[in-house]
Every structure is written in structure tokens, then in C-alpha cells.
Image (cartoon, grey):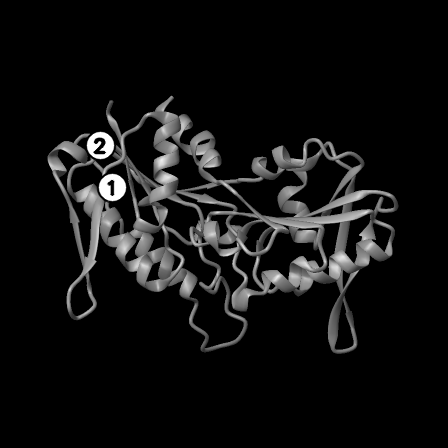
Amino acid sequence: MNEVIFSYPTCDKLAERVSDDTQIPVWKINFSQFKDGWPNIFIEDVEKTVSNKTVFYISDISTPAKFFENIAVIQALVDYYAAKVHVIVPYFPVGTMERIDEEWQVATAKTMARILSSTPAWENGKTSFHVFDLHDLRERFYTEWTVSFRLHSAMDLIKNRVADIENLSVAFPDEWAEKRFKKDFKWYPKIICTKVREWDKRVISIKEWEVKWRNVLLIDDLIQTWGTLREAAIKLREAGALRVFAHATHGIFPNDSQDKLSEYLDWLTVTNSIPENENRFQNNPKIEVLDISKAIIDKVIRVVIN
């Protein structure tokens, strides 16, 4: 077999599941630190595991420190004569500002794109970055032509999860989410919420609906500040929804806000695109974590090797 899988340590479980399904071998990279805190990274037996191989690297760039370590590894894989390099990015962080609202702000999304664009090409083509449910689609255009930035969705996971729920409508918390994901749920009745300004605050209202006596699934790409989904859930119940569920590919939940949000829902699902989420919600029976490894296999691995 000419393919191999590497992973950042937090993504080792994902790599093992992908390997179990595809039979592509997993090779480890040793991540440690020097005494001054800088990374000490070592790829063993490079000639056997990297050279002339199609390399899949499952990354975790959820923090600046992890981003640096991952970039170092990705560039090394190319330097060590990999035949092809495909970087799988389950979660592309939204903390990188995608726009400047006023002068003197630093657009860190552009800086991040420049660093990604510095990844060297392998002998016969560009390094590919495969990103799932990118929060701001404009960011794909910030990278240069030197790399390939490919977008994928993990929404099939929740479609399978709710396939047996009767009288299901799909709701979007705002017009942006509706534009992004309506094609993934075209067979379901749609409910579109909108944010309207009332004096000095924005409130959620239902723009289009078929709510009464329906089970309703709220869909978004990520949950960061949980207030929007909470307000949408309240409005849907007031309009007569029987049950209200919510799903997002990426669950950020600063300050453990997932517990507060789940109080307004019958259940909530996210994926393990952020690896720590696998074990983070074990004490909350309303929260379920869907395994993104299947989306990685279907949308990236099998497409590339076939």
C-alpha cells in the first residue's frame, strides 16, 4: 500500500478509526518539548513511512501553539519527499479575524493564510488542505495558488442521526446558515430565523415557518456564543414546536456554556472536530458527540485514493 496516515497527538483516535475502516497504516510522529518550551518533533523511519508515499495528515490547529507545531510537521512531510500530501483540518479556528471593522485592527486570518501558503509543493503538485464546514467561506480565498484549499461538509452525520424522526422540520438560526446548508436538507420543511434590531439589541424572530406540532432541528456550522441558538429555541417552542434539537459541526463552548444551552433543547449534537469534545460532555446526557472520522473517510480518503 502506498498510502500512510499521520496525526497530531490529539487526533490519534481519529486516525486509528480511519485506518480501521480503510486499512491504511498509521505511523506515529513523536511530539515533545525542549526545556525552553519549544517543540521537539521527530518522524521515525522517514524513508519507509514518508518517501514516495501519499500522506494523509490529520491536524489539530485549534490553538496558536498547535498551529505552529502542525505547520512544522506538514512542511517536513513535503521536504522528506512525500509523493503527495493531504492535510485534513477537521476544525479551522474562527478566532482568526476574517475582516477589519475599523482601522488598525490586525487581520490575523490573512497572516494564517500566508503561513499556510508557504507550504512547499510536492514534486508533482500542491499540498491540499481539506477543511470541514469552514465558518467564513471567504477565508478559502486568502490562501495563495501555492496550496489547494478544499472545503467539505460533515452534515451527513446529523442527517443519518435524525433519519427516523417523524414530523421533522429543519431550522436555521439566521439567513447565512440557511444559505450554507439548505441544500443538505432539501427534503425537509424549512424554518428560517432572522436577527432583527430592537433599540440597542438584536433579537431572534421567525421569518418563515412550519412549526406547530413539528419536531425542529436547528442547524449551524459552529456554536461559539450560544445565545443565538438559545433564543431561536425559545421562539420555536413559543410557536408550537413539539421538540427542539440542535446540531453544529464544531462545538466551541467557551466557559462550558454547553450546559446552559442544553437546558433549552431536547438534545444537542456536535462532532469531535475538536478532539477534546470526545470526553468533554460525558456528564451531560443531552449532548451527543458524532464521530467525524466517517466524513473524513467518505469526503477525503476514498475520493483521493480512488
User: Quadrant of the image for the C terminus?
Assistant: top left
Who is closer to the viewer here, 113 or 50? 50
The quadrant in which the N terminus is found is top left
Residue 300 seen in the current view: yes
Mark number displayed over residue 83? 2
Residue at the image position 43 percent from the left and 31 percent from the top: 297
Q: Position of residue 217 (x, y in %)?
A: 71, 45
Query: Rounded to the nearest whole Å, what is the CA distance between mark 1 and mark 2?
Result: 10 Å
Element carrying mark 1: loop
Looking at the rendered image, the disc whose residue lies closer to the viewer, 1 or 2, is: 2
Name which residue type carries label 2: Ala
Q: Position of residue 175 (x, y in %)?
A: 70, 52
Residue at 76% from the left image edge and 67% from the top image edge: 203
Provide residue 231's location: percent of width, then percent of height. Answer: 74, 62
State left or right for residue 169 relative to residue 17.
right
Which residue position is annotated with label 1? 121
